[in-house]
Image (tube, grey):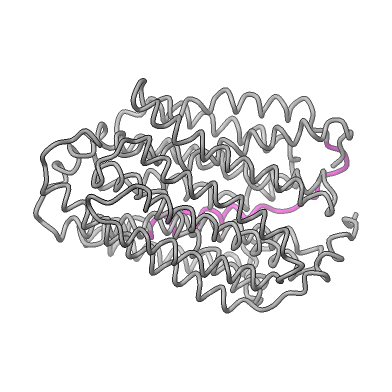
């Protein structure tokens, strides 16, 4: 792929705009969800609004990465943006929680095309010695979205329809698509590779069944057991398909190498940790602590502000401290940050939640940046694309499982409490920070969210332990490998 030097900044700007749509999902939707579920009902499906997006994104990431090799980067990016915007428009007109979940699936498919191919475009356009600077620009997207997301979410919920939470993606997506259409130039023949459609479908079935089994655990045992059976069968067929596929969706031999296996395990668990925070912290701050959606959103802002700062410091100190110590340091910070949420109590301060978010985001910056470099530098050039995709896959899968497992923990805790009905909790969420009375419902929700935060802490400890298992990697050898030209 080639592009005139003057077009590179414009393509980079388009990548940043497209990435912004994905990044802002982490804060703006989380900020608005307590009010949305209060209007639409079905509190038991709360986690599915996040899980459906992540499921579709996870299942399609590797597939769209391969399609980009077959049909070119531009066509896949434009298709991904179109799908994402269609899903955004439909989310805004959702009439129930099931319809919102279905439209979030469409959004997730678009995100599955945008995220990996945008990273690939950066790799195509910029040499190895330039990518550190470019990664800083991309990290800034998350920082900016962390500020704009909660502010926009709070203002939209307060002054206009919640549909605009999703519709604001439309102008951003149109600008990004125009930039790719006019300035992204491709040359050379695309690599003809097979697409493991059967593997992608089996994976989607297995993970969706697992999500349903966990969601219904403790509330509908028959559906939970049937879903678990489908998950086991689908998982077994997926493994069989991947071992026989000529160009598998997941290369098990690559994943089995110790640096990749341990780093991806830490990445998967860190994805579960961060999604637990972004999904349930706004609900606690608004309903249990009694603050506005805007305040709840800004408690998440600290996470995404800390992330790029940690990533920048990590990248600048790799040579001084080494990759493994940097990753371990990030892993240690995660349970420290998560402990602040376990210690939250009714009547507590949102500053405590914000401080925990900042520490957790700081740790994610160190861990995620070190993880991707370890993954890339532990393989040769010819395997670097597949190894990088495996790390992105692991993070998305962790987010999918985290939203589902922790959502199931919330539902089971509420069901076992028995003191209040789901309808009472729904009414409390609908009124949000302005709610009065309903002390029993508020207390029950607070206790259930405390259980969820304890789960986040346990997963964060698991992330730290996995980080200690990652072997040392020679950074300087990896840097020399990256300077090699791409094979023809």
Residue nearer the viewer, 446 or 455: 446
Q: Quadrant of residue 138?
A: top right
Q: Quadrant of residue 95?
A: top left
| Apparent side of residue 336 relative to residue 173 in the rendered image (left or right) | left
Viewport quadrant of the N terminus: top right
Name above or below for residue 359 compared with residue 257.
above
Name above or below for residue 232 compared with residue 397.
below
| Apparent side of residue 131 relative to residue 254 in the rendered image (left or right) | right
Q: Position of residue 72 (x, y in %)?
A: 76, 40
- Indicate yes or no whether the magenta region holds residue 79: no
Name above or below for residue 194 compared with residue 475.
above
Residue nearer the viewer, 154 or 408: 154
Write the residue at 38% across / 43% down: 49
Residue nearer the viewer, 415 or 283: 283
Viewport quadrant of the C terminus: bottom right
Count of numbered circles in the view:
0
Write the residue at 87% across / 66% down: 480
- Indicate yes or no whether the magenta region holds residue 206: yes
In the image, the segment drawn in magenta is 186-210
């Amino acid at each position: 792929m080639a592009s005139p030097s003057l077009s590179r900044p414009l393509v980079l700007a388009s990548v940043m705009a497209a990435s912004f749509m994905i990044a802002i999902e982490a804060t703006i939707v989380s900020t608005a969800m307590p009010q949305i579920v209060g209007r639409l009902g079905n509190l038991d499906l709360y986690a599915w609004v996040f899980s459906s997006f992540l499921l579709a994104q996870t299942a399609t990431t590797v597939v769209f990465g391969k399609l980009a090799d077959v049909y070119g980067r531009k066509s896949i990016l434009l298709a991904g943006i179109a799908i994402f915007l269609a899903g955004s428009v439909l989310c805004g007109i959702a009439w129930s929680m099931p319809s919102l979940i279905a439209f979030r699936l469409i959004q997730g498919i678009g995100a599955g095309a945008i995220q990996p191919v945008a990273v690939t475009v950066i790799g195509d356009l910029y040499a190895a010695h330039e990518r550190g600077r470019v990664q800083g620009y991309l990290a800034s997207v998350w920082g900016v979205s962390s500020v704009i997301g909660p502010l926009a979410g709070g203002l939209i919920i307060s002054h206009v329809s919640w549909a605009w939470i999703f519709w604001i993606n439309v102008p951003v997506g149109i600008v990004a698509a125009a930039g790719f259409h006019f300035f992204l130039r491709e040359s050379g023949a695309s690599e003809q590779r097979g697409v493991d459609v059967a593997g992608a479908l089996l994976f989607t079935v297995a993970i969706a069944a697992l999500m349903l089994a966990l969601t219904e655990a403790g509330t509908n045992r028959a559906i939970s057991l049937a879903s678990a059976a489908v998950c086991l069968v689908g998982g077994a067929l997926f493994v069989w398909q991947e071992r026989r596929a000529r160009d598998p969706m997941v290369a098990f031999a690559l994943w089995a190498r110790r640096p990749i296996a341990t780093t991806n395990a830490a990445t998967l668990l860190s994805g579960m940790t961060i999604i637990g925070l972004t999904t349930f912290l706004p609900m606690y701050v608004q309903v249990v602590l009694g603050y506005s959606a805007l305040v709840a959103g800004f408690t998440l802002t600290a996470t995404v502000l800390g992330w790029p700062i940690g990533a920048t410091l990590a990248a600048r100190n790799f040579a001084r401290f080494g990759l493994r110590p940097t990753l371990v340091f990030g892993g240690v910070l995660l349970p420290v940050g998560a402990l602040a949420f376990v210690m939250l109590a009714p009547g507590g301060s949102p500053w405590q939640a914000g401080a925990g978010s900042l520490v957790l985001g700081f740790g994610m910056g160190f861990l995620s940046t070190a993880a991707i470099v370890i993954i890339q530098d532990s393989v040769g050039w010819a395997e670097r694309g597949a190894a990088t995709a495996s790390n992105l896959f692991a993070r998305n899968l962790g987010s999918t499982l985290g939203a589902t497992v922790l959502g199931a923990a919330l539902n089971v805790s509420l069901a076992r409490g028995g003191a209040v009905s789901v309808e009472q909790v729904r009414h409390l969420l609908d009124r949000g920070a302005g709610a009065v009375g309903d002390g029993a419902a508020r207390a029950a929700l607070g206790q259930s969210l405390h259980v969820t935060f304890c789960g986040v802490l346990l997963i964060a400890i698991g992330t730290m332990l996995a980080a200690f298992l990652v072997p040392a990697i020679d950074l300087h050898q990896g840097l020399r490998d990256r300077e090699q030209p791409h094979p023809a």
